Image (cartoon, rainbow, N blue to C red):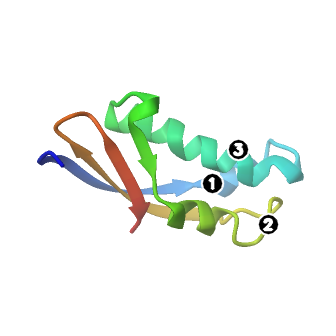
């Protein structure tokens, strides 16, 4: 793969953001929020963001109704614009 341009660690507050959704949609919306957050903060296109399965498993760990209140992710942006995210 190409050289690393930017590597950052973010802490996302999911509980605060997901309270406005119905309980059965919270984990689904949390995964979409992580992708949207990375588009905004890493300045990348949505189709070039690769979210590791560890993030998905962490969000869905307690089911659809109770995503974690915070999640810490490490995002790496490469020369070609691809962003890879994994648990920190």
* Residue holding disc 2: 63
Whether residue 17 is visible, yes or no, is no
The residue depicted at 70 percent of the width and 44 percent of the height is 29
The circle on residue 80 is: none
The quadrant the C terminus occupies is: bottom left
Residue 48, position as x, y percentages in the image: 39, 35
Q: Distance between the residues labelled 3 and 2?
A: 13 Å
Q: Would you say the residues marked 2 and 1 are in contact, meaning their CB atoms lie under 8 Å apart?
A: no
Query: The residue tagged with tag 1: helix, strand or loop?
Result: helix
Give the side of residue 12 with respect to residue 10, left or right.
right
Residue 14: numbered disc: 1
Q: Residue at x 52, y 36 (%)?
A: 36
Q: Nearer the viewer, residue 49 or 12?
A: 49
Disc 3 marks which residue? 29
Q: In this view, does 39 lie to the left or right of 77?
A: right
Sequence-first tag of 3 and 1: 1
How many numbered badges does the structure rendering display? Answer: 3
Q: Tell me if mark 3 has few (under 14), some (14-19) or many (20+) residues whose alpha carbon lies within 10 angstroms of its own.
A: some
Query: What residue is rendered at 21% in x and 43% in y?
Result: 78
Residue 31 showing in the rendered view:
yes
Q: Which of marks 3 and 2 is nearer the N terminus?
A: 3
How far is the residue under mark 3 from the one under mark 1? 10 Å
């Amino acid at each position: 793969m190409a050289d690393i341009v930017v590597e950052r660690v973010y802490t996302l507050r999911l509980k605060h953001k997901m309270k406005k959704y119905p309980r059965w949609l919270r984990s689904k919306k949390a995964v979409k929020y992580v992708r949207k957050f990375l588009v905004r903060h890493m300045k990348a296109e949505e189709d070039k963001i690769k979210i590791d399965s560890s993030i998905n498993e962490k969000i869905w760990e307690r089911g659809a109704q109770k995503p974690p209140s915070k999640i810490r992710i490490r995002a790496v942006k490469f020369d070609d614009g691809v962003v890879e995210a994994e648990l920190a």
